[in-house]
Each structure stands twice: as structure tokens, then as C-alpha cells.
Image (tube, coloured by chain):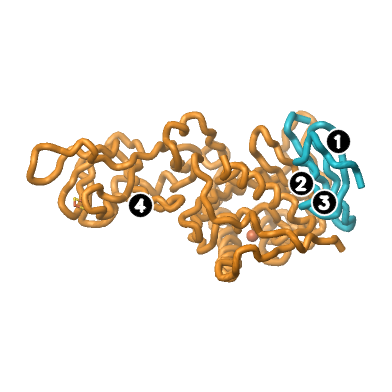
Amino acid sequence: MSAGLLRVTWLPGDDILRGRCHCGAETEADDPVAIWEWLLAHPDHPGKS
Amino acid sequence: MTRCDPGHKLAGMTTAFVRNQWYVAAYGREIGRELFTRTVCGESILFWRTGNGAVTAMSDRCVHRRFPLSEKPSHLVGDTVVCGYHGFTYGADGVCVAVPGQTRVPRTARLRAYPIVEQDSFVWVFIGDPTLAATTRIPRAPWLDKPGWTVVAGMEPLAARASLLVDNLLDLSHETYLHGGYIGTPEVAETPITTEVDEEAGIVYVSRRMADAACPPFYSNSTGLTGRITRWQDIEYTPPCLYLLHSRIAPVGVLPNDDGSDPDAFHVEVVYAITPETEHSTHDFWAVARDFALDDQEVSDYLEKSNRTVVLQDVAALDTLEQVIATEPDGYQELSINIDTGGLAARRMLARMRAK
Ligand code: FES
Ligand SMILES: [Fe+2]
């Protein structure tokens, strides 16, 4: 993955978004606002809920 | 279904322009030896071609009493523009070379000149500090001017802020509802999407790959495919102006070869240039390039008519939306769900560019 690449995958029918930061940290959330906030907090990603 | 965020403010809907960027001002074919004007990011710009074919761009307001130089009886004489009101005359660099009745031309008599690049069938203009133009990227849409591709294109005036068109194009699930019977089929809204943000390159990607989908009329009538299809929609948005939709259509199960060649698929490159005119209106440039039926005029006519119809469906919806939100008080709320992941990423990137 190139430096600076953030990825969010979503499977419709499943309500969960999966986010992956360029540092490798991953999270899940059920709302796109929350997922971008989490990704953009790099390197201070909040702990997984 | 998905829990939403009722508290999310519509902060991304600001109408402020992103400056110090290149914007598509026109198709090259629109500009010739007639004076041509277009407003970009609130700036009225005069365009014309010099005798040797170069496009030139300068302010469309005479420095004397601000008469629009695009307005008759202003006219070109060789490589100069003569103002139709009192005759101030300007060269291709915008510098005033003659004024009526006196030999001395005031030193400050010059029109603001704009950096221009003609590329990929577009005329790009730089809005902002011209010293930054050379080091600011111009995204490419090579299919619009390339052997092996046939293009249909147009431009529709949109009476809505540019951010509404960005939202619209970043979430193609609306095809199923707003464009049913043209390009929408049920699978578009039902298929997984992957959103990627490349922070360094400043690009937002949204990818939707339908393995087994109905073929909408837009593609069945142009490709001749009649059965179910494999349909890929790969969006590549380079804010603020250029949006690409790499569309791949093939019979179900037909994939590209390992070496990347893809002889059994149909490729369509859908290009939009999203150029703010004012804070509440936008130039909606659209083009459809294809790598099949290259000389088939019927296919060209069909794609041109169909795509324009689809664009006008969006225009009607967004014009209505602009009327609604323009009259609402600041800080009204909206609600985002999973389909908005790409649109939110684009808004954030635009906000960051605006703040620079
Ligand atoms: S307004 Fe143009 S010459 Fe007077
Ligand atoms: Fe649309």
C-alpha cells in the first residue's frame, strides 16, 4: 500500500465499514463520518471500541 | 439498516472557491477567432485564439470603464482586442497598446492575464496566484484526444453549487433511482464499494465491481451485449475539477488477461469537469470516450443523447436541491450513511485545499 493511502471497504447488506490506515491500523465503524475521523486521527488512532 | 449520524453538520457544502488550482474553462473547439467569455470561480474571463492558434485568456473587463470585451462592438484586429466602448486596445498578453486621442498609454493599463494550458481537448485556466500555476498539477484525461477512442461530449449549465455535483458523482448508487432505465440497474445500489484516499496524490477512488449484473440500455444499445454482464465502475476524482469514471463492460465472467490486456471487454471513460461559475452555479462538462464501434455514428448519436439525458436528470435534481438549501439557515443538518463514504472523503479533501 502506498504511503498515505487510506482504505474503507463496505459490503452492502452488512452495516459495518472497515477502515485501514496507511500505517496498517484497522478499525470498524457503522458510520462513514466516524470512520474518516478515526483514519484522519493518525497516528493517534483511538482504541478500538 | 445503518445507523446514521444525525448530528453531522453540512459543513462540506460551503460555496467558497478552491483557489490556486487549474479548472476546465472550455473545450478547445469552443475557442477560435471570435471573442469568447466564460465565468470561472466568479471571474469573468475573455478567451480567443491568436493568429498562430494559441489560446489566450484575460479579464473580460476593460480597465477604462469596465465594458465587457466579449461584448459587441468589441472585436479582434489581428492579435489585439479593441474595446467596443472607447477603443482601448490590448495585446494577447493583456497589455494595453493603444488608447484613443493620446499617444501615452498609462503604464498600469493592462488586463489581468490567466495561465492557460490546452490539453486532452480541454482549455484549462489557472485561478489564483499565477506564479503558482507552473508547479500545480493538471490532471489528465487522455482518452478525449487519443487514437483508438471515439468521444461524445457536452456541457450543461448547472444552477447549483459545485459541491452538490461532487456529492452526486461520488455516490453512483443514485443511478438506480435517479437514472433507472438509462444507466441504473438494481445491482448498482446493491454492490460492495471500496473507497480509497491517496493523501499524497490528492485523489479519491471509489470502486464498485459488479460480477453479474443486468446490462442497462446505455450499454446494451452501444455494445450489442444482450445477456448479463460483468460491470466495473472505478471512480478517480482529482479535486477540485476532474472526475473520471473508468467503466468496464464484458460478458459475465470475462476478466482481463494476466498481462493486463483486455480484448474482450468494452471500455468507456466517462469524464466530468466540475468548474464553479459562481458560488451557486457550475459548468458541468461531460464526455464519454469509448474504445469500440469507433466509426459507428449511430452509436455516437445514441451515447450522446443518452448521456446528455442522464446529465440533465442530475441537473434537474441538483437545481432543485440548490434552491432548497440556499434558503435554509446555516448549520442545518444532514445525515450520512455508508454510501456517502466517498463523497465525505472528497469533501474533506476539498476543505483542506480551500484552507491552504
Ligand atoms: S470602457 Fe473600454 S475603452 Fe472605455
Ligand atoms: Fe447522476
The cyan-tinted chain is A
Q: Position of residue B33 (x, y in %)?
A: 29, 45
Report the Cα–Cα distance between label 3 and label 2: 18 Å
Pointer 3: what residue?
B192
Pointer 2: what residue?
A36
Is label 3 on the same chain as label 2? no
Q: Is residue B128 left or right of residue B190?
A: left
Marker disc for residue B37: 4
The reply to whether callout 3 and callout 4 are in contact (CB within 8 Å) is no
Q: Chain of mark 2?
A: A
Report the Cα–Cα distance between label 2 and label 4: 40 Å
The reply to whether callout 3 and callout 2 are in contact (CB within 8 Å) is no
Report the Cα–Cα distance between label 3 and label 4: 43 Å
Residue type, mark 1 in image: Ala
Q: Residues within 10 Å of mark 3 (few under 14, many from 20)?
A: some
Q: Residue at x 8, y 42 (%)?
A: B102
Residue type, mark 3 in image: Pro
